[in-house]
Image (cartoon, rainbow, N blue to C red):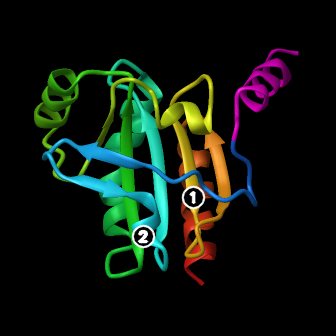
Amino acid sequence: SQPATAQQDIEATTLIHAGDVAPDFSVEMLDGSTVTLSKFKGKVVLISFWATWCPPCRQEMAHLQEGVIDHFAGKDIVVLPISRGEQREVVEKFITDNGYTFGVGLDPERTIYDQYASNFVPRTFIINKRGKVTYRVAGYDEQTAKAVNAAIAKALR
């Protein structure tokens, strides 16, 4: 069946699984600063790899501010959307056009993405306070959004 095949494709292209230590990286942010994953030990981190041309990614980006950042305001969580394989200008225009104010990482050469997966966006990884991946998912819909928030809440406990 089609869904099973899609799920197999996703599994086959996923390099990091629940229970794995998240590969460390430094990423240049749209504002020119650099953030390093390992510096966030003690916090829960949501990493979302996305692209401007991808409709489910656009949905997830629209959801992030209210659905995750505002929802978990005041909690020990870092939300880190990382644009995969696109140049700064493209990402900047998309973020500006949509009025997003949260930080966005740039991965134009896919060097960070390629440590986590070999295909498909969006991909979301939840990393616990000890730096381990506790949840991961590819794709985005309302059900996914609920599952991601449940995984964040669990990691925060």
Mark 2 secondary-structure assignment: helix
Quadrant into which the N terminus falls = top right
Q: Residue 101: x percent and y percent?
A: 16, 51
**Dot 1 surroundings within 10 Å: few (below 14), some, or many (20 or more)?**
many
Residue highlighted by disc 2: 40
Q: Residue 123: x percent and y percent?
A: 55, 38
Q: Residue 3: x percent and y percent?
A: 79, 22
Q: Is residue 35 magenta?
A: no
Task: Name the residue at 36% across, 18% down.
Answer: 53
Q: Is residue 120 above or below residue 68?
A: above
Q: Is residue 8 magenta?
A: yes
Magenta range is 1-15
Residue closer to the observer: 6 or 38: 38
Q: Residue 111: x percent and y percent?
A: 46, 31
**Dot 2 surroundings within 10 Å: few (below 14), some, or many (20 or more)?**
some
**70 sits to left or right of 130:** left
Q: Indicate the amino acid at tag 2.
A: Phe
User: Which mark's residue is nearer the viewer, 1 or 2?
Assistant: 2
Q: Is residue 20 above or below residue 150?
A: above
Task: Name the residue at 46% across, 37% down.
Answer: 49
Residue highlighted by disc 1: 126
Q: Main secondary structure of the magenta part?
A: helix
Which quadrant of the structure image shows residue 20?
bottom right
Q: Is residue 14 above or below residue 90?
A: below
Residue closer to the observer: 19 or 57: 19
**133 sits to left or right of 98:** right
